[in-house]
Amino acid sequence: MFIDKYHIMNKTNLDQALAALSDALKSTDPNSFLENPKDFVKKIPFRSLSGDHINGGKIINFSSSGISDKASKEQITISDNGLVISKFSQGFSVDGNIHTNSLSANNIVVDRIEAKEIIGKITVEEDDEPIINGPIRFVNDNIDGLGLLWNGKDYTKQFIFLSNPDRIFLSESIDLARNKNFSINNLMVLNENTLGTSVTKSYLREVGRLKGLIVEGTATIGEHFYFDGNSKRLGIGTEQPNAAINVIENDVEIIIGTNNSAKAFIGTMASHSLDIVTDNQSRIHLSADGNIVLGNFKTAPIQTSINGKLAIRIQNPDPDVDLHVAGSVKFNGKLQTHSNGLPDSGSFNKGDIVWNTDPRIGSYVGWICVQSGTPGLWEPFGKIGNQ
């Protein structure tokens, strides 16, 4: 029996298709079907059924020119909410590219992902243990501005690459865990409380309290405080100190240092006076010409105590006396001097005494002025001997 293939394939009524199939079976020799069923199947013409005539039921070993179903249980569910695929990484493979506006899955395993934008939480793991098999790479002729962005409620946080000059830009603070540090070339440069030993240069503008500061070589503080590492001298107000410590203020130069290994000095470098003060008052005044004033005439008289022996104009004072004077003295405004006779010149006041430097028996201890004048009127006193 011959069945028009074109006629049958264009029929859309299920009853007509089944009737045509029945006619074909009736015209076939039953023995030939039993002997060679494959040849019989080949004689059955291709048929088509409208999708409107199929509702429900399960199709086993379904296949078509584009789909082959080999699953033993349900793997794909299609609903109004979308497409759900169970065991995506084990049961789904793609030869080629996937283009989609939205893809949701519990687990996706691929050899390579190329994306214009990745949004969400990213975890790389194996057997529930996080792993990192390689770096995240940004491959492009221009990678300027590429990196990581976090879109927050206030502004976008950035960790990106910037060029000209090449650098990594981070918009946020970095908070390291305790006992961690920043390193360069595997050398620690900064941790919680220590600068690394490789940090040897700095332009610090402000520091807090320092403890144990060590400076090697020349140092400058505030363009006013200088230390010369070669001469080991400190200058305040000068870059070329003339002593171990040299201070210049208002064109007056003060120096503190040593002349040799046995003598130190403190004073002025040029012809300037020097005051030693307490309570902002001069107590000892050394004039530029060398005169010394103890005390201050503008204040109340001071007390000067000498715990030792005093010598005036004496290079080798007598150790047996407390006061050794080489010259005349005045006591309560009265002159006391020495000579081998009465003064014949000079002005003297009543009460001045001249001690006799050549005392003999019958002579006198000295002479006293009884009338002021030049040289005044003098009388002897203190006759030596019993005569």
Image: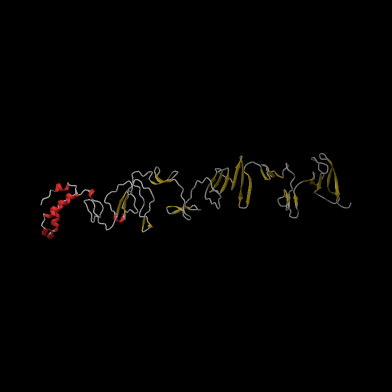
Give the number of callouts. Answer: 0
Coloring applied to the structure: secondary structure
Q: Is residue 280 above or below residue 37?
A: above
For residue 149, side relative to residue 201 (left or right): left
Query: Does residue 45 appear anywhere in the picture?
Result: no
The residue under the point 19% across, 48% down is 13
Residue at figure coordinates x 13%, y 60% from the top left: 34
Q: Is residue 7 visible?
A: yes
Residue 177, horizontal then vertical, whole percent: 47, 54
Residue 121 in the figure: left or right of residue 202: left
Q: Nearer the viewer, residue 254 or 150?
A: 150
Q: Position of residue 218 (x, y in %)?
A: 53, 47
Name which quarter of the figure residue 124 lies in: bottom left
Q: In the shown orientation, is residue 69 left or right of residue 307? A: left
Q: Position of residue 383 (x, y in %)?
A: 86, 49
Query: Relative to the observer, which residue lies in front, 60 or 335?
Result: 60
User: Is 29 situated left or right of 252 in this image?
Assistant: left
From the viewer's side, name the closer residue of 169 and 233. 169
- At 63% from the left and 47% from the top, the residue drawn is 266
Report the front residue among 77 and 346.
77
Identified at 61% across, 49% down, the residue is 259
